Image (cartoon, helix red, strand yellow):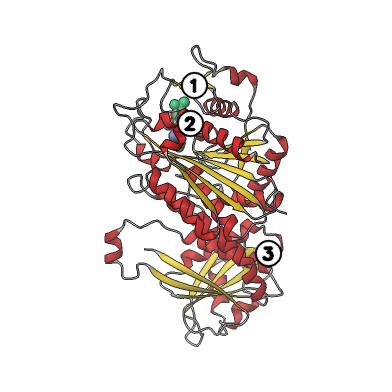
Amino acid sequence: MSISIEISFSKSVKISGGLVVAMGSLAAPVSAAARTVDPAGQLDKAVRVAGFTGKTFATIDVIAPVEAPADRVALVGTGDPDKLSAHEWMRIGGKIFPLIGKASKVTVLLGDAGVPSAEAAADMALGLLMRSYSFDTYKTKKQEEDDSASRKVAVVFQHDDATQCKKAFAIRQAVWEGVELARNLVNEPANVLGPVEFAARAQDLESLGVTVEILTEKEMKKLKMEALLGVSLGSVRPPRMAIMRWQGAKPKDKPVAFVGKGVVFDTGGISIKPAAGMEDMKGDMGGAAAVIGLMHVLAARKAKVNAVGIIGLVENMPDGAAQRPGDIVRSMSGQTIEIINTDAEGRLVLCDALTYCQERFKPAIMINLATLTGAIIVALGPHHAGLFSNDDELSRALTKAGEVTEERVWRMPLSADYDKMIDSKFADMKNTGGRYAGSITAAQFLKRFVKDTPWAHLDIAGTAMGSPSTDINQSWASGFGVRLLDELVRANYES
Ligand code: BES
Ligand code: MN
Ligand code: ZN
């Protein structure tokens, strides 16, 4: 069942039917606002019976008394509402979603005494939208059987400063669209989204004022991107590279650059993966999806920054034309690579994209995102992305943005000892470093293609997909990276 939420803010609302949600705090488990729709005191009884204390994230839900203007009344606990972070307000917003039930109208009564702020109210709305996401494009049966399928629910937030709420929400609306886009791209199967189709989705950003160029196989050959092209050899679907540019600052300002791994499906190639779980490799373009999602956000909220997004799009398949272990390819940088394992393909795609990015755009900073290694899932699980960087300041900024958005990153080491592990007998380097430290040797590989630019690599294999359900995400694809990097840009790179 897919519920599409329509958010609005209003200073005064006339309640007739539907669900009313009010906040409850430790100081006042039943807020004054809640009492206005519950003259008979039904809530007080429910609070007593159920032991609802108003602690953060607790909820309670009752049928409203006959004389009340609403059908149902719910309370959501805010604990000490003055102490909540933006992310906690988002989670509180998420908590509203399962309360909706069959209601088609929801009124959220905020604010005794200006709490929460307009910003926090907008955060709640964002959290609710993120929670409401579900990918059910291909569920035909469910939609026929369930007559409440695909319905709209109007959610009105009652807040004294509705004007300020609307302003704050406009920015979150842009963020939500970017997250939704990234989630959709990752959830979508690879038969639907090949490199060409994926590039077309990047091209769609033109409607927001993003300049988009798509490089074809022929153009990439001319640029000598042999590392990227090698990965694509076994696929009947031709590779693409999409270059997205958002110019929100002075034309001369150096751009911030984001590079994404876009392997639309990763079979492993000739070094083929085991069958179990291989279907998850439709999400091996999570880095590219985050980059598209981010570019969407920056353009939609008209960020005062110049930003470049580059995604390398290929399919890693085994066939008669596929590349082999032992093959040696020459990357766009001129450095040669011995292919040890055709399943270590992400770094081969990224190295040429990184070279292209630096040569063409000379960015102020460059961040790449990739579902690069299974080893990062072993190390960090689904709760942090691996962060590898040549720059302490950029690392700190990313870590901070991760704390704010709760899209967390954890810095991992880089050093000459690890770098040695990818020296090759036959070429400048090999594409795998052996059994140990797999995420680090992958990062060392990428580092060999980074010149003086402050750079960070985010290994999002554990966070972009298959992530645990949370108050703001119930979907296989999380959209990880979009909010993280939007926050990074907002806090550090906007003029
Ligand atoms: N796309 C995978 C990494 C991955 C694994 C992402 C699981 C998400 C979930 C990547 O291309 C890969 O196959 N990496 C290999 C590298 C190895 C061959 C050196 C891996 O992690 O096993
Ligand atoms: Mn692989
Ligand atoms: Zn891969």
Disc 1 on helix, strand or loop? strand
Residue picked out by circle 1: 337
Q: How far apart are marks 3 and 1 (CA)?
A: 56 Å
Q: Front-most of 376 and 195?
A: 195
Residue picked out by circle 3: 81
Which numbered circle lies on residue 255? none
Q: Do the residues labelled 3 and 1 touch (CB within 8 Å)?
A: no
Q: Distance between the residues labelled 2 and 3?
A: 54 Å
Q: Do the residues labelled 2 and 3 touch (CB within 8 Å)?
A: no
Q: How crowded is mark 1: few (under 14 residues within 10 Å), some or many (20 or more)?
A: many
> Which amino acid type is marked by label 2?
Met
Q: In which quarter of the image is residue 110?
A: bottom right
Q: What is the x, y in percent for residue 362?
A: 65, 38
Q: Assign the N terminus to one quadrant of the image.
A: bottom left
> At 35% from the left edge and 40% from the top edge, which residue is drawn?
279
Disc 3 on helix, strand or loop? helix
> At 43% from the left edge and 40% from the top edge, which residue is drawn?
216
> Which amino acid type is marked by label 3?
Pro
> At 51% from the left edge and 26% from the top edge, which residue is drawn?
331
Q: What is the x, y in percent for residue 184?
A: 43, 53
Sequence-first disc among 2 and 3: 3
- Specify whether residue 471 is in view: no
Please identify the residue farthest to the bottom as the structure is shown: 67
